[in-house]
Image (tube, helix red, strand yellow):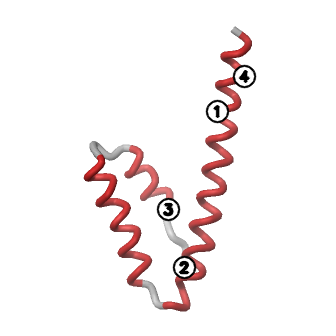
Amino acid sequence: MQYDFRKFHYRSINAANDAERAAINQELKDLYASLPENEKDEFNRQLQAFLAKEMGRIKSDYESVKGGLNEN
């Protein structure tokens, strides 16, 4: 099964406040808790891959902006 972590990520980014962000995080935790034990490892693997990809993208974006600021 493929999990759509991007959906949770974007909803969290666009949350109106901390309470809404906490509710979105709880949805993700509830999804994990509802999985059969044999699917939790795959969920974790996909989540880690998503987070690593997003962190790499953010780092690249940051370095691009930082480099542009240093040139000015």
Between discs 4 and 2, the one toward the N terminus: 2
Between discs 1 and 2, the one toward the N terminus: 2
Q: Position of residue 1 (x, y in %)?
A: 54, 79
For the C terminus, the image quarter is top right
Residue at 65% across, 63% down: 49
The span from disc 4 to disc 1 (Cα, nearest Å) is 8 Å
SS at badge 3: helix
SS at badge 1: helix
Residue ID for mark 1: 62
The span from disc 1 to disc 3 (Cα, nearest Å) is 22 Å
Residue at 44% across, 85% down: 35
**Circle 1: is it few (<14), some (14-19), or many (20+) Cα within 10 Å?**
few
Which numbered dot is residue 5?
3
SS at badge 2: loop
The span from disc 4 to disc 2 (Cα, nearest Å) is 40 Å
Residue 27 position by quadrant: bottom left
Three-letter residue code for mark 1: Tyr
Between discs 4 and 1, the one toward the N terminus: 1
Q: Are marks 1 and 3 in contact (CB under 8 Å)?
A: no
Q: Nearer the viewer, mark 2 or mark 3?
A: 3
Q: Are marks 2 and 3 in contact (CB under 8 Å)?
A: no
Residue ID for mark 2: 1
Three-letter residue code for mark 2: Met
Q: Is residue 46 above or below residue 6?
A: below
**Circle 2: is it few (<14), some (14-19), or many (20+) Cα within 10 Å?**
few
